[in-house]
Image (tube, grey):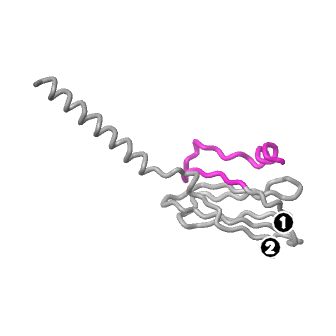
Amino acid sequence: MKKALSFSLTGLLLFTILLCVISIGKGEENINECLVKYRSEWYKPCSQCLDYSKSYRVYFRNVCKEPLDVKVAAQESDKRWKTYSRLNMAPNDSIIAYACKGTGKHMMWVRKAGDNVIVFPSDEEINQQYAN
């Protein structure tokens, strides 16, 4: 009888732990999925570009319920990256990256707002590592 009770309690404990683990996993969003590209445009007038005949703009939005720190980049035809950062980007807020003579390539980095453990790459690191 003690074995049956012990077995039942052990099974109940394992079941409870499993439910806790599953519910914790579902509650956390993958932070990398919070920033989404929702539009891009070519050849649009840009106040920052002298010649916008090859301009490229890409739009990103925070689709999660928590604020984010983000860094986004668009590549110029000379293979250099123009970067833009936003700290504490609110839910549903957006950020635009543009290149005056773009290649159509873009990148993004995301972290929870204020999470300084994750360090975004510097512009120099981006241009050295992704210059292709």
Secondary structure beneath dot 1 equals: loop
The residue indicated by pointer 1 is 100
Residue type of the residue flagged with mark 2: Cys
| 1 and 2 marks in contact (CB < 8 Å) | yes
Quarter of the image with the N terminus in it: top left
In the rendered image of this protein, does residue 76 appear above or below residue 124? below
Residue interval drawn in magenta: 107-132
Question: x, y percentage for residue 118?
Answer: 60, 43
Residue at horizontal 79%, vertical 61%? 104
Question: What's the amino acid at mark 1?
Answer: Cys
Q: Is the residue 25 above or below the residue 4 in the image? A: below
- Nearer the N terminus, badge 1 or badge 2? 2
- Residue at image position (55%, 53%) is 113
Q: Is residue 116 magenta?
A: yes
Element carrying mark 2:
loop
The residue that disc 2 covers is 46
Q: Nearer the viewer, residue 54 or 51?
A: 54
Q: Residue at x 45, y 50 (%)?
A: 28
Q: Disc 1 to disc 2, how far (Cα)?
A: 8 Å
Residue at the spot 28% in from the left edge and 40% down from the top edge: 16
Q: Is residue 7 left or right of residue 74?
A: left
Number of numbered labels in the structure image: 2
Q: Position of residue 102 (x, y in %)?
A: 83, 62
Q: Furthest residue to the bottom?
A: 45
